[in-house]
């Protein structure tokens, strides 16, 4: 008995089709293992957060290339605000299924922006021991954001803080702000 339908391999299906969702339990288990891996190779909270950020940076680098090649025909943002809105909305939806809660500009420093997430999924399943009270595992996300911005042509340093939930402080290089002002003047 032969089947009249030809079976298509998973390799033949386009990458952009499909549900694109991952089980929350699987995500929690995988991230827990990442944290444990970094923790076993760290001697301080700062070192642990740095390792998480570095791992996130690797993820962000791959994610940026994948998204812009697949979805945008390699067209990248050139305006600072557009890139920040891309991170807050599109990137966050790809990663977490929802937009980040807020994007704010610092009043006292034109180089600093804040991406605020009231209930960060990345911290939801992590219980922080009392001796590591200041640990914020959202440093992993900070690394992703830093990679996306830096490799997108907007070099910045991104750190995760406990404030209004989880706040990602994005501090751009001086020339990024200068370049953006020149683009506005055109």
Image: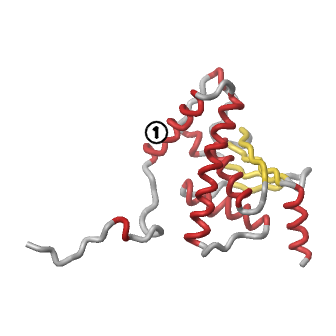
Badge 1: how crowded within 10 Å, few (<14), some, or many (20+)? few
At 65% from the left and 32% from the top, the residue drawn is 48
Q: In this view, does 163 lie to the left or right of 129?
A: right
Q: In this view, does 3 lie to the left or right of 157?
A: left
Q: Is residue 139 visible?
A: yes
Q: Quick one: quadrant of the N terminus?
A: bottom left
Residue 26 x %, y %: 43, 44
Tell which of 62 and 106 is nearer to you: 62
Image vertical order of residue 105 relative to residue 75, above or below: above
Q: Quick one: quadrant of the C terminus?
A: bottom right
Residue 180 x %, y %: 86, 67
Which residue does the numbered mark 1 point to in the structure image? 29
Find the residue positioned furthest to the top. 131
Residue 74 x %, y %: 63, 72
Secondary structure at badge 1 equals helix
At 71% from the left and 51% from the top, the residue drawn is 146
Q: Is residue 128 left or right of residue 168?
A: left
Q: How many labels does the image show?
A: 1
Residue 11 x %, y %: 37, 66
At 55% from the left and 54% from the top, the residue drawn is 96
Res. 104 image quadrant: bottom right
Res. 10 image quadrant: bottom left
Image vertical order of residue 77 relative to residue 32, above or below: below
Q: Is residue 119 visible?
A: no
At 80% from the left and 53% from the top, the residue drawn is 113
């Amino acid at each position: 008995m032969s089947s009249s339908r030809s079976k298509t391999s998973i390799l033949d299906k386009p990458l952009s089709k499909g549900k694109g969702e991952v089980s929350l339990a699987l995500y929690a288990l995988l991230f827990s293992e990442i944290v444990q891996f970094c923790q076993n190779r760290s001697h301080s909270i700062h070192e642990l957060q740095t390792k998480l950020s570095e791992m996130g940076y690797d993820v962000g680098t791959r994610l940026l290339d994948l998204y812009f090649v697949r979805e945008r025909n390699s067209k990248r943002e050139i305006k600072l605000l557009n890139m920040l809105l891309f991170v807050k909305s599109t990137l966050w939806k790809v990663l977490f299924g929802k937009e980040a809660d807020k994007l704010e500009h610092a009043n006292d420093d034109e180089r600093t922006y804040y991406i605020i997430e009231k209930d960060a999924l990345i911290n939801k399943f992590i219980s922080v021991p009392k001796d590591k009270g200041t640990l914020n595992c959202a440093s992993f996300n900070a690394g992703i954001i830093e990679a996306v911005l830096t490799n997108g042509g907007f070099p910045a340093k991104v750190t995760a803080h406990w404030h209004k939930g989880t706040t990602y402080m994005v501090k751009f290089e001086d020339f990024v702000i200068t370049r953006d002002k020149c683009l506005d003047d055109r």
